[in-house]
Image (spheres, rainbow, N blue to C red):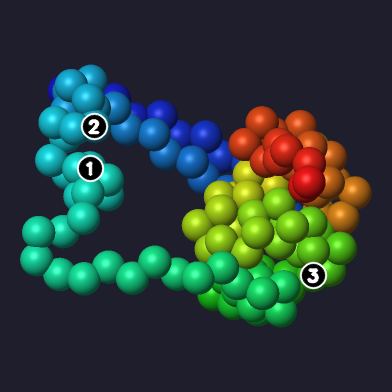
Amino acid sequence: SSSRRHLVFANARWSVTLTAMWTDSARVGLAQARHLAHRTQMPRHGYAQPLRPFSLEDTRNYISFHLQRVDADLELFSDPAIQRIFQATRGRPRYINQLCLYLLIQAAISGIDTIDGDFAAAQIAAHPFYQQPPEA
């Protein structure tokens, strides 16, 4: 058995749809869910190469590329916001994806059309994942 929930955030410029699906295998646990286990283990046969962190310019281009792919406004993230994203994620692509999605959701909830540096900084500061110990 399974159940599905949809949550949609939208405004005149863009929308975000989140879909969560719970199945019996999800209740068993990630280790026993075969369709999810491949995400947590190295393949038996093959090679995996981790991506090295992006530079600030790479991060800017990466975000721009994804905005272009969905035909979104390229100014959706201001340059100061991109700088904050880069600092918080240390240029790691997966974290960039996660943080951008989080910022898009928070912007939709707040009714904000452009994510600026101050908004990004406030959201990053409020998120426990991005709390970093001070550099020594």
Question: Front-most of 96 and 44?
Answer: 44
Q: Which residue is mark 3?
A: 75
Asked where in the image residue 125 lies, by quadrant, the reply is: top right
Question: Circle 3: is it few (<14), some (14-19), or many (20+) Cα within 10 Å?
Answer: few
The tag earlier along the polypeptide, 1 or 2, is: 2
Q: Is residue 52 left or right of residue 27?
A: right
Return the x and y of residue 28 as percentages of the image width and height: 18, 21
Name which of mark 2 and mark 3 comes first in the sequence.
2
Residue at point 49%, 41% (across, down): 18
- State the residue lying farthest toward the left: 45
Corner quadrant of residue 71: bottom right
Q: Which quarter of the rendering shows the N terminus?
A: top left
Q: Residue at x 65, y 59 (%)?
A: 90
Whether residue 28 is visible here, answered yes or no, is: yes
- Image position, residue 48 (x, y; %): 27, 68
Residues at marks 3 and 1, CA–CA distance in whole angstroms = 35 Å
Is residue 14 in view? no
Contact between marks 1 and 2 (CB within 8 A): the answer is yes
Relative to residue 69, is residue 80 drawn left or right? right
Disc on res. 93: none
Q: Helix, strand, or loop for circle 3?
A: loop
Q: Amino acid at mark 2?
A: Leu
Give amino acid for label 1. Answer: Leu
Q: Which residue is mark 2?
A: 30
- Labels 3 and 1: the sequence-earlier one: 1
Residue 15, x across and y down, in percent: 62, 51
Q: Is residue 38 above or below residue 19?
A: below
Q: Residues within 10 Å of mark 2 (few under 14, many from 20)?
A: some
For mark 1, what is the residue?
36
Q: Is residue 76 above or below residue 18?
A: below
